[in-house]
Image (cartoon, helix red, strand yellow):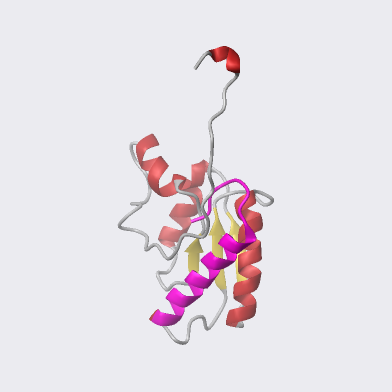
Amino acid sequence: MIGTGKTSRRAVLAGAAGLIATRTARAQNFPSSRVSLVVPFPPGASTDTTMRVIADKLSQMWGQPVLVDNKGGGNGIIAAEAVKNAKPDGYTLLATSSMTHAGNPVLYDKLPYDPIADFEPITRMSLVPMAVLVTKKLGV
């Protein structure tokens, strides 16, 4: 899963290698057609940029187009629901942060997807450290 923020190229490409190895082990002829990489963030966001690098490398390695499909909005719910409703053949992948699967179930009483039952994790693509900062005047 991809988070927001800057990621190193090494972490991103290592994640792509894990994705390739996992899929190759399951089906030797995968992919035989276009693969969609659904990103729940708008074009230009850090996740979008990272996924475009990965999509390009996967396209080269697989000999099939891997297209980034941005479905921003709804705190990732729109994209997660689109992937949940896609044909379950491995040709539609969700590249997301932990928000859609860990955060949203806490924030929303009802989701149009089950983060555990409706998805199969493939690999972690990167780890993005985050920090909360406040003014010194707050006194914490």
Q: What residue sits 58% from the left and 81% below the top? A: 62
Residue 127 lies left or right of residue 47; in this view the side is left
Percent of width and height locating residue 8: 62, 56
Q: Please tell me whether the stretch drawn in magenta is mainly helix, strand or loop.
A: helix
Residue in front for this viewpoint, 72 or 56: 56
Q: Does the magenta stretch include residue 18?
A: yes
Percent of width and height locating residue 63: 61, 83
Q: Which of the 4 image quadrants contains residue 70?
A: bottom right
Q: What residue sits 52% from the left and 58% below the top? A: 95
Q: What residue occupies the far right of the structure in this picture?
A: 44
Give the vertical position of 8 relative to 104 (above or below): below
Q: Does the magenta stretch include residue 93?
A: no
Give the vertical position of 73 relative to 132 (above or below): below
Q: What residue sits 55% from the left and 44% below the top? A: 73
Percent of width and height locating residue 97: 49, 50
Residue in front for this viewpoint, 136 or 12: 136
Can residue 90 be seen by looking at this rendering? Answer: yes
- Residue stretch rendered in magenta on the structure: 1-25
Residue 124 lies left or right of residue 69; in this view the side is left
Q: What residue sits 43% from the left and 74% below the top? A: 22
Q: What residue occupies the far left of the structure in this picture?
A: 117
Residue 40 lies left or right of residue 108; in this view the side is right
Percent of width and height locating residue 55: 61, 68
Can residue 65 be seen by looking at this rendering? Answer: no
